[in-house]
Image (cartoon, helix red, strand yellow):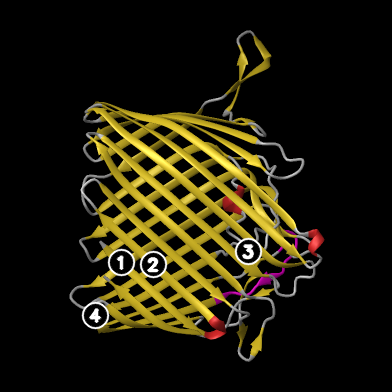
Amino acid sequence: MNVDMQLTYGQYNNMFSTISLSHEQEKFVYLLNSQFKRSNDYGYGKTIYSNTSYYENNIGFTGNLNAGDGWKTIFDGSVDNESHGMYENPVYTREEKEKYSLSAVNIIRQSSSFEWNTSANVAGYTHRLAARDSDNDEKSSLLKLKGSLGGEIIWSASNRLRFNVDGTWYRYNVADVDNDDFVKGEMIDDFRLLSFLRMSIGLNGAWAKNGGALIMGRLSRPGDSSRKIPVPVNPTGSLSLFGNDIVSVTFQYRHEMEPFRAENFYFEQKYVYPEYDLSPTRSHVGEGRIDIKGGDYVWFKGGCVVKKSDDFYDYVADEAMVLRAHKLDTTMLIAKGDGSVTVPGSGVQVVMGYEYSHYYTSEHITYRPAHSVTSALKYNGSVLNIEWSNRYQSRVYTDPEKNGRLKSSVIGFLGAQVQMLTGFYSYLRVENLYNNKYYLRDGYPEAGLTVLGGLRILL
């Protein structure tokens, strides 16, 4: 059993705590983690921003059970909830939201050539905007149920067939919004062409209650070119280069349809007004990935995605300064890379990450930076551990039709811990290290330099 606990307290009555517990038994392994952060009204310099207090809480659980010969069950659960004061918003005073997800996956190996799996998931999302006039509070929620059945048939050492079918049901607790259903299936044949080259080809299909079927195109009927027959199956394929422990490369194409996942879309941003009856997104996706590993000291992961989407969803603010979903067609290019270098025998590690995003569309894409860079320098010694990290994001648009943008920002972080006794550490945490005044949302300031101190226990 391993336990990692951290508790810090500092400016603005800010408290940050994390707990991680892992336990391995003969047939069951699990990981339980929790993170909680809260603050009173925070500020910048000597200025305190009124009505900015908040808390953010996350609890997660993952378990792996070997139920019998060839039978494995994976459990996964998480609960996230947040509450944020809305500063000087003229209509609302506080936003509260929560999402949860519980799932179980069964993987059963019937024989050396056949394996099948089932999964079940229940998830939910609730949202509340507390109005200055309490009679005008805005409340909404959804419930999602999902089930799937899949399997894998191994024809030979170089050929295998995979298939999967899943169905999702959404129920919305919102007036005048109908429930939604989504069904998706795919079948993929994966085979080896050469000792270093693998190829996958397959078909997939999808249907949504509020969006119809995903079709690749229409074919003329024999003898009647004026009538078209829809083709409800769509191609997917990939090429993978492998064969050594250093480099692997994958190229992939797929035509897909995904439902509007309100529980994720609205949780990614603060201060939103959820709308639920939105159509699914249809996309043509091309993707390339590369992984490079140089022993235990160097690794790099990179990728590039080109995605042409109908009904892509962006954010747009209304008169009440809350974000709503905004639909448009776009082609996006996203390229990113992450890497790490560890200096042997020194305890020093350098981690870097970069992401570039570009959108080909007639409107501005909001709150998505073109350039995002992360870096971290870590030192892990026998008594002293230090982490210095930075996050940079370029300017972002705040309105699809206007040129106003939030300025770019560099946010630094410093963490240091000193061992006092075996498994017992004193801990220093400094957030917004350079005391930059910055905004992640137009009209809602973030905290300046914040210093916290506390303890960390490792068992």
Who comes first in sequence, dot 4 or dot 3?
3
Furthest-top residue in this view: 223
Q: Residues within 10 Å of mark 4 (few under 14, many from 20)?
A: few
Contact (CB < 8 A) between labels 2 and 3?
Answer: no
Residue at the spot x=61%, y=90% of the render?
Answer: 45
Tell me residue 32's x, y (percent): 37, 58
Residue at the spot x=29%, y=61% of the render?
Answer: 299
Q: Is residue 8 visible?
A: yes
Who comes first in sequence, dot 1 or dot 4?
1
Contact (CB < 8 A) between labels 1 and 3?
Answer: no
Contact (CB < 8 A) between labels 1 and 4?
Answer: no
Tell me residue 360's x, y (percent): 62, 52
Figure check: 144 above or below 164 = below
Going by the numbered disc 3, the residue's amino acid type is: Lys
Q: Is residue 449 visible?
A: no
- Residue, disc 3: 270
Figure check: 183 above or below 303 = above
Residue at the spot x=21%, y=37% of the render?
Answer: 195
Contact (CB < 8 A) between labels 4 and 3?
Answer: no
- Residue 116: quarter of image: top left
- Residue 60: quarter of image: bottom left
Tell me residue 176's x, y (percent): 77, 40
- Residue, disc 2: 19
Q: Which residues are magenta?
A: 399-409
Going by the numbered disc 2, the residue's amino acid type is: Ile
Going by the numbered disc 4, the residue's amino acid type is: Gly
Q: Nearer the viewer, residue 59 or 179?
A: 59
Q: Is residue 401 magenta?
A: yes
Who comes first in sequence, dot 2 or dot 1?
1
Q: CA distance from mark 2 to mark 3?
A: 25 Å
Give the numbered dot on residue 230.
none
